[in-house]
Amino acid sequence: MTEPVDDPTAERLAAALRCATVSTDDPRDADSAAFERLDAHLRASFPRVHAELELERFAHSRLYRWPGVEPDRVAAILLAHQDVVPVDDAQRWTHPPFAGVVDDEFIWGRGAIDDKSRVLAILEATESALAAGVRPRHTVYLAFGHDEEVFGGEGAERMADHLRQAGVRADLLLDEGGVITAGVVDGVRQPVATIMLGEKGYATVRLSVTEVGGHSSMPGKQTAVGRIARAVARIQDHPMPLRLIPVIADMLDRVREVMPAPRRRLLGLARVAAPVVARVMAAQPQTEAMVRTTTAPTVIRGGVRANVLPQRAEAMVNFRILPGDTVASVLAHCRKVVRDKGIRFELIGMSSEPSRITGPGPAFDLIAGLARAVVPGIAVTTGIVPGATDSRHYDDLAGTRCNFAPIVLDERDLASIHGTDERLSRVNYARLIEFNRRLIQHFATVGAPSTSGAEA
């Protein structure tokens, strides 16, 4: 059984949570002082890391290089991010979100799960390895972005470009995404570790229309607002097609072994009756995201007064794109289902194609084995990240990609991510540190596994 972290270790994480490194869409609005406080804290807390590893900063992002005994080969790029999302209503929190409160069971604060705990855990493990005289056989990079929550354009993208220009190609890329869930998978009693092997793409489509306007007492058949509302309804009522992609079929194969008999039989048909299984999965939002490109209307606006016909109206619809679909196919789908030539469609903000999916291979087996060692008795499966992470910027820089952290979360914990009362138990933090300690020890003894031929 894992022992909780001691007070000094918990306090180092809590002190990082007190630095309100909140993401902002405009880099000029970032609280640079908060990031500099975090920088000072990390330097003071992990002196060996900052004395022995090479550190290069990209704005507030941090790229560490830990040269190996054989420095030309790269074992791994370990990702995490320092930034956090804003707090909506601090009054609803048990403790102030940036107070970094530590009690007997939890470390509380925005970023406790997403994602400062991973930054600190990697540094804790590296610091202790350096104190023990450990050196990796092959070079290891630690890449800690500062703007992941706003798509990483100034941080992860620049660090990845730097590594690309340096000709870096790692055996393993490890980032956030999957966790170990308890009581979340219906009908499964034991905790399930989901090691993600890629992520969905991202696009936001803006629909807009312009009309003449006028007095509301003499409207035409449709106002600008009505046309936009109708277009959004068509897009929502006609979602992208359901598909069971190979990585999700593999996920179902793995998890079915721990499911009740009726579900085992259904999932046993996944590869031969994929459309049926996909329709069953589409019944719940959490599983529907695994079998289709999701459609989420998020913004609609138009008009200025109740008695004035609007001259312009617009809406925004966010899509998370399943591998096999593309940003272009999403735009084409919108035009096809709306069937209104007066509506304009355009992409806004960041867009990204779905990542390639790396197949389970030696690197996956390594991560799965370490997860089982840290949290015995778990089931392990694969999956894809439904959201966006910094690792998409590094997609071509590693043979195998895994998005995973060995922390055990229930539904309340999951709801706190980007929500209220984010917190991480001392036991979970200990698991996270121990996992990274074992991973670094593996790099020191045998290097990262070869992943040639591991793509699916």
Image: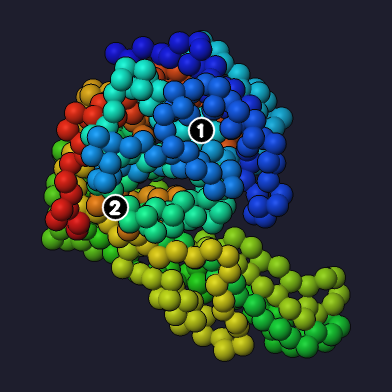
Q: Name the residue under label 1.
A: 116
Identify the amino acid type marked 1: Lys
Residue 25 vs 126, above or below: the answer is below
Q: Could you tell me which residue is drawn at 49 percent across and 22 percent down?
A: 47
Q: Position of residue 148 (x, y in %)?
A: 52, 48
Residue 364 can be seen in this image: no
Residue 87 figure quarter: top right
Few, some or many C-alpha atoms within 10 Å of disc 1 (few <14, some 14-19, many ≥20)? many
Q: Where is residue 229 in the image (x, y as percent from the top left)?
A: 63, 73
Depth check: give the residue in front, 365 or 71. Answer: 71
Residue 96 vs 85, above or below: the answer is above
Q: Could you tell me which residue is drawn at 46 percent across and 42 percent down?
A: 63
Tell me if 308 is positioned left or right of 374 in this view: right
Tell me if 410 is positioned left or right of 454 in this view: right
Depth check: give the residue in front, 275 or 10. Answer: 10
Residue 310 figure quarter: bottom right
Few, some or many C-alpha atoms within 10 Å of disc 2 (few <14, some 14-19, many ≥20)? many
Structural distance between the alpha carbons of marks 2 and 1: 26 Å
Q: Position of residue 249 (x, y in %)?
A: 21, 54
Identify the amino acid type marked 2: Arg
Residue 306 vs 104, above or below: the answer is below
Mark positioned earlier in the residue sequence (2 or 1): 1
Q: Is mark 2 on a helix, strand or loop?
A: loop
Depth check: give the residue in front, 181 or 55. Answer: 55
Q: Which of marks 2 and 1 is in front?
A: 2
Q: Mark 2 points at which residue?
A: 169
Q: Where is residue 315 in the image (x, y as percent from the top left)?
A: 63, 69
